[in-house]
Image (cartoon, coloured by chain):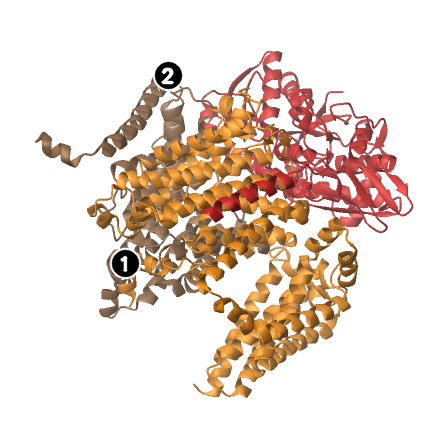
Amino acid sequence: MKNLIRLFIAICFLLSIMAVPAVAGNVVKLEKGEPVHLAYWFVTSGPNTSLGMDSLRGAEIAIEDFGGKLKGHPIKLDGQDSMCGPEGGQAAASKIASDPTVIAAIGSSCSSAAKAGVPILWKMGIPNVSPSNTAPLLTDPAAGPDFDGYLRTCHNDNIQGAIAAEFAYSQLGVKKAATIHDGSVYAESLQRVFSDTFRKLGGTITSQEAISPGDTDMRPVLTKIASGSPEFLYYPMFIAESGHVTRQCKEVSGLENIALMSADGSFSPDFLKAAGKAAKGMYHSSPDFSALGDSYTKFLAKHKAKYGMDPEAPFHAHTYDAVILILNAIDKVAVVDGDTLTIDRMALNKAMHETKGQKGLTGDLTCNANGDCANPKIAIYKTSMADIKAGKMSPKPFWKKY
Amino acid sequence: MTKAQSLWNHGVKIGAIGGVSVLIIALVGMIESFGKRDIISGILPMGIAMALIICTLVAYIAADKTPISEKSIKFVNAVISGFVTSGFLALLVVIGRSFNMRDMLIAASPALYKALTAGIAGAGGIFLILAVGLICGIFAGVLILLDTFPRKLIIKALATIFILGLLQELIMPLIKSWNFGITNYLGKLFYTQNGLTIIGVVLAAVIFCIISLLWKANQNAIKGTYTDLPKGTQKKVKTFGFLVLAVFLIVLPQFLGLFLSEVLTIVGLYVLLGLGLNIVVGYAGLLDLGYVAFFAIGSYVVAILTSPEIFSFGFNFWQALPIAVIMGITAGMLLGIPVLKMRGDYLAIATLGFGEIIRILVLSDFLKPWLGGAQGIGAIPNPNFFGFQMVKPQHIYFLILAGCMLVVFISIRLKNSRLGRAWMAMREDEDVAQAMGINLVATKLLAFATGAGFSALSGAIFASKIGSVYPHSFNLFISINVVCLIIIGGIGSLPGVVVGAAVLMGLPELLREFAEYRMLVYGAALVAMMLLRPEGLWPEARHKIELHGDDETQTQTAE
Amino acid sequence: MFQKWKDRVTVTDIVMWMIGGTLLLLCLWGSVSTIRAGLYTRSHWIDFCIFGLAQGSIYALIATGYTMVYGVLKMINFAHGEVFMSGPFTGYFVAMALWRSDFLDTHPILGIIVIFGVAMFVSTMIAYFLEKVAYRPLRNAPRLIPLITAIGASFFLQYFFRGLYGSGINAYPDIEILEGFWMIFGVRVLKIQVIVIIASVLLMLVLYNFIMMTRVGKAIRAVSEDKEAAALMGINVDAMISTTFVIGGMAAGAAGVLYALMFKQVHFFMGFIPGIKAFTAAVLGGIGNIPGAMIGGVFLGLIESVAPALFLDGLGIIAPYQLKDAIAFSMLVMVLIFRPTGILGERLSAKKA
């Protein structure tokens, strides 16, 4: 027993010595030949793989276009799978945060993952730029200091949700709508913005239902929705669940001819696979690519040449812009000293937030203090039978506000 | 058994099993995706190394299993099975080159065939595969012909090289973070940016052989010295050993850097969980598949009390911690009541149900105003230790270490207490235990409560470590993982829990390249472990008899 | 009289009954207020029930596999959900090949039979080798050991198929003859659901008769009663256990294709949740008991479909369908409180449970 007590005292003593704060180093020093390390955390497995892989391809092309080198140091891109959910975001961010060579992170694909992961990255001083997190709360001034190191090059859903509601109310002329979300930050906030705007315009929301990710049998919940007899169903969820809802809507009495609408999270050829013929006549809101200029056409040609396919999801161009934004900012703040390159990640974050008028594929990027950098143009797309046969989302916007 | 039969049974059949294994590895994409990483820089990619290892291993097993004592037959069997194994791969390449199988098997890509044939087109590549298989078989045959000591030496030296190559991504950043003259030099000597250098390979093999030879020469002397010591001194040596271990554990994170410390904290959290479940399953014999519920409760209590996002209670971590543990214990009692009468698998599914109910309730929109719903609770402050913010994994590590020590201490004391013996009696036979005057209700509830308390403690630390809680983090897999780790470690054994957590939770984290195949390897390892070593890695001395006693009826029927 | 009653009933019993009673009262109250609020018409309720029946009959088919394995081996075959997944996942590629070549449009019945054949074959093979590799060497091991190999095999199979076929979206093609509705007694019913329900009922009848009537079935029952005695009677125990897995695998493969035809999407993880549900159903009905598994499956399917609308709407709980699994598990706990060995389960002795 005496030994145990002695041991305990010794341990306490040592603990107090060891617990001396280690200086949180926010400066990354690169010696000759060591790479500038960027880490992505997209979704690279599961039903939403197309969303993450699309971004990854955009990032790879961006690094190629940048020249693959930054002040003589090669650029290295690797990453983790954030799996489109908070637990995946936590895990991926913890792994990136525990790698001291990472200079900046790109990601995540889904807002839920970002909400969980960004504070973890920022605690370790790693700034992050997202190409596809659209949930409003991430750049909300009320988000707090945990999100100081966060920027995004895509639109904010305050815009997307409102446009969807305006489209439904003014263009389609529906007065009664219902929504479904899957509990993700993305779907939940998008349907909330939609509902609020729709109500403000004068419409009624008959029900706001929720399902769980991974559910397959939507018929009961759709029957419940049908009991309120809405004319319009808005379900801005991800590919698998949106596919189930689209198919099963046609099978529930009362909902056969209802207008259906989803959002950019399922704007992918994979969605047509999941929904099949039932997707005919369905609407999606997504960034307007027809409005983009020459540089985007060039990007598409490069994409086709490099990967033998067209982009699969709406966020490749945003990722391209995000990577260029990061690299430009690093270029600005990196200090060359002989062979070593010194990068202060705090200064990098500040420089990124101060980006003004960067010419990007998606337009001119100017970041505000909250981290919103996009200059969004959202359009509504309609899927036709021809699109389903071709297995591609419609390339031409069906309706746009501007 | 005739020689011809043996050739068929042991040469060809085992070769075929090996062939199927190699095919599995190739078709799930492991060979191709590990092709980018080299074990030996520029010479041996990791994917190919794995195929070689399997091929050689299969040939070795084939020879080893041959019941005929003639060495020549063993040798021939090894060669045959090595050849057969590679034959499967050769067949895959032949078929794959003429048919496009990619629509179905996504890994059957030209890149895979190129990796397998080392880029040689046409029949040359096929012959290369077969020749390599033959060489593996011959190598395994030669190993069989050798004496035990040189055989083991060669196998272990090769394993050392493989492991050194495998762990490059782990060792190099460490060396960089130490930034110390000798280690820097050694790092440059052994490793390139991708894989070991040739000098590194030779050096590693030579150094390993020298150490083994020295150990073999002196091992009896070293062991003898210890057993020769008088009892009192032996005890002192042991205490000293513990002290060294304690110091080692405390200074460990200073040397490990960010990433390994992070891994250590994950292992630590699972050790806490495992120690708790060990009481429920290991001591009391109640199979609980909903153990994650208490982990979730611990996390959420800390989150609600300390985070300003939903309610601003403004507690700090140390104030919230005891409340979390008490809530966990209460929940353990409450959830224990309905399942008191259930046994075996009914208990397992009912507890699994509890775990899911808790997760679904937390996830629901209905309770969102209080629990945050799917969007969880963020902005949980880090623990503050007398004005010192515990931010980095290295700091949280100390917190977890303290928690583990406390829980280990309680576990040890409980095990030999009246209560611990009552638990074990209950595990053996509930009816007899009751007849002996044990209050089953109280004993069961105490087991649930203690386990739940430890779990809640782990959850509380988890919440403050990660800074946010989400219902999805508390899924069934955590319960399953914890059950697996205590059984892999050796049920009822305390060091077993630590070993189990390190092997099941720590190792997969270390092998980052395996990320995509992590669960595949994990699953295969669970099956293999249970087939080869069902008693666990560090079994408790008594438990084997006890566990077998539990299944007396089954043992009898099968005999 | 009172004294006798007092001896038998303990405090815990009373507490347990109170918990069960509270749950029951909540359900009743919810149902009454939902029905009084009149949100749903008669046809809505019929729809809920049919959706539940279709889902439940698939659970029932999977659950028979669980329950039979439990009968002979007294173990939870955790990997059964993966047996269920492997068939339709492989069948998907057959279906797509047939669809692309227009075979599925010209000979739909034959095409569907081919898909069923392939899927059932794959599931059967997986089940057979699963038993042979992962369970047979552990025949005499303590009961937690095979549970762990089952969990390990489950992970392995999931990620093996993920590596093999990828993790993206795969959806069965639309088959013309399975789409649309039938009017049955004036009620509009989805064709596919009628087919699923009829096919499941037929399969379960065949299975039940096979177990009850044939020699092999009798041998399997003998093995699940007492292995040693069965062996003494000249029954090849190992072969019977293999047969059990084969039958369970066939049922799972068939259930898998029905599931895929109903929901279209197949992926490597699709077996996990139905697997857990079917396991729950098997326990609900009394594990080891084949009719019990069927009743448990249908009951669970109905609860999932009807209960959120019926119980929770009236209680004013928003988004009730998020909570359907919570209700299902609460029902399970409630049933087990009153009948600790399931609906049809025999009163097992301590040793057997």
Numbered disc 1: secondary structure = helix
Q: Earlier in the sequence, mark 2 or mark 1?
A: 2
Q: What's the colour of chain A in the image?
A: red
Left or right of residue B163: residue A38: right
Q: Position of residue A307 (x, y in %)?
A: 75, 49
Q: Which residue is mark 1?
A: C224
User: What kind of residue is marked 1?
Assistant: Ser
The C terminus of chain A lies in quadrant: top right
Q: Among the chains, which one is brown?
A: C
In which image quadrant can residue B193 be found? Answer: bottom right
Q: Position of residue B449 (x, y in %)?
A: 37, 37
Q: Among the chains, which one is orange?
A: B
Instruction: Count residues near mark 2 (Cα–Cα under 10 Å), then give few for <14, some for 14-19, many for 20+.
Output: few
Which is nearer the eye, B498 or C162?
B498
**Residue B96 can be seen, yes or no:** no
Left or right of residue A26: residue C301: left
In this rendering, the label closer to the viewer, 2 or 1: 1
Numbered disc 2: secondary structure = helix
Which chain's residue wears label 1? Answer: C
Q: Position of residue B385 (x, y in %)?
A: 59, 32
* In this view, B318 is above or below B159: above
Q: Position of residue C320 (x, y in %)?
A: 44, 26
How far apart marks 2 and 1 lie (CA) works out to 50 Å
Left or right of residue B395: residue B237: left
Which is nearer the eye, A309 or A137?
A137
Residue at (7% x, 31% y) in the render: C1
Q: Which residue is mark 2?
A: C37
Instruction: Count residues near mark 1 (Cα–Cα under 10 Å), then give few for <14, some for 14-19, many for 20+.
Output: many
* In this view, B530 is above or below B436: below
